[in-house]
Every structure is written in structure tokens, then in C-alpha cells.
Image (spheres, rainbow, N blue to C red):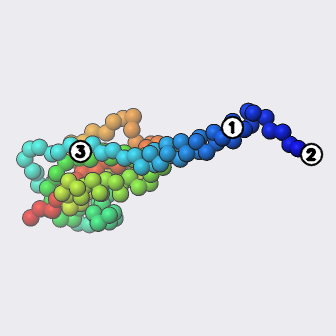
């Protein structure tokens, strides 16, 4: 018995690798996408608040503080970093790499688990009411600092 394959099925089989390649390419670009808007601090450096201790992680060699750091520092600027949906759990990794590129010694995360409005207001940062750290894109909002004397 000889099986006959319809022309429509033959065309679909021929197009399947192209469709799969296109899908993989799009997924790769979406998975690698990241953007960061940096806003330099301009003005006199204040005696910025310090804490007696703070929780911190080290991400890509950069300390990420979730409160005021326990030593003097100067503020370099504010970073809004967004990553692709597939990478939203690595948003502070992208922010740390960007901070290192900009000459920062550490960052103060403003939105690890929700928006820390009190911490943000200390640095004059006002959150967009329509955004949150739990959004689809993984946003990292952080103040970039360099250690002072």
C-alpha cells in the first residue's frame, strides 16, 4: 500500500524548520533584552544617611544594599534598569553590571520586594505609580554610590 501525502501537508513540513528557527530567534532576542536609564546626580553632596548595619547581597562583585549602607558614601546617580520577562529574576545582576560600568562601588536597591518609597524619597526619587518591581519586565531601581571618606 502506498501512502499519498497531500500537497498542503508537504508545504507545512517544508515550512516547519523555518517557523521553528524564527521562533527561536525571537525568543533569543526577547531573552537577552535589557535596558537601563541612568540619571546622574547633580548638585552638592549631602551627608547621606547611614545605618549601623544593613542587609546586602553581592551581585557580580557589587554590593547591593536594601537599606542605607553602614559607611559614608557619595551618590553618583539613579538607575532604572529593565530586563526581558524571561530574565526578570536577574534584574539586579544587570543593574550591578551597569553600575560597575559607571564607576559605582555599590548600589542601594529601591525596589527589592515592592517599592521602598521612604528610601527613594531620601534620594529624591519618585516612583511611577503605574510601575512596580513585580511587573512583567523585572525592573531594578537603584541609587549608584561610591564610597566616601
Q: Name the residue under label 2.
A: 1
Q: Quadrant location of the N terminus?
A: top right
> Of 119 and 4, which appears nearest the observer?
4
SS type, badge 3: strand
- Asked whether, in this view, residue 63 is left or right of residue 31, the answer is left
- Estimate the spatial distance between the alpha carbons at disc 2 and disc 1, rounded to whole Å: 24 Å
Which numbered circle lies on residue 62?
none
List the residue tagged with mark 1.
12
Residue at 20% of width from left, 53% of height from top? Answer: 102
Q: Residue 75 appears at what percent x and percent y?
A: 16, 52
Give the residue at the far right of this rendering.
1
Per the image, label 2 sits on a secondary structure element best described as loop
Residue depicted at x 31% and y 53% = 95
Find residue 121 and report its horizontal and vertical position in percent.
24, 44
Label 1 crowd (10 A; few <14 / some 14-19 / many >=20): few
Mark before the other along the chain sequence, 2 or 1: 2
Residue 133 can be seen in this image: no
How far apart in space, not on screen, are marks 3 and 2 (Cα)?
69 Å
Left or right? Give the position of 76 relative to 136: left
Kindly report which numbered mark, 3 or 2, lies closer to the viewer in this rendering: 2
State which quadrant residue 94 falls in: bottom left
Give the residue pinned by disc 3: 38
Q: Nearer the viewer, residue 32 or 104?
A: 32
Q: Is residue 136 above or below residue 74?
A: above
Question: In the rendering, at what x and y percent does residue 81 appear?
Answer: 33, 46
C-alpha gap between disc 1 and disc 3: 47 Å
Amino acid at each position: 500500500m502506498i501512502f499519498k501525502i497531500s500537497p498542503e501537508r508537504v508545504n507545512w513540513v517544508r515550512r516547519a524548520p523555518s517557523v521553528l528557527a524564527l521562533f527561536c530567534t525571537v525568543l533569543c532576542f526577547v531573552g537577552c533584552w535589557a535596558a537601563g536609564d541612568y540619571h546622574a546626580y547633580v548638585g552638592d553632596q549631602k551627608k547621606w544617611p547611614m545605618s549601623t548595619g544593613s542587609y546586602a547581597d553581592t551581585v557580580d562583585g557589587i554590593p547591593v544594599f536594601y537599606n542605607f549602607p553602614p559607611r559614608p558614601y557619595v551618590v553618583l546617580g539613579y538607575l532604572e534598569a529593565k530586563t526581558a520577562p524571561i530574565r526578570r529574576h536577574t534584574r539586579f545582576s544587570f543593574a550591578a553590571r551597569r553600575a560597575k560600568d559607571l564607576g559605582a562601588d555599590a548600589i542601594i536597591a529601591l525596589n527589592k520586594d515592592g517599592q521602598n518609597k521612604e528610601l527613594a524619597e531620601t534620594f529624591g526619587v519618585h516612583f511611577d505609580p503605574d510601575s512596580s518591581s513585580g511587573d512583567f519586565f523585572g525592573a531594578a531601581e537603584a541609587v549608584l554610590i561610591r564610597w566616601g571618606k
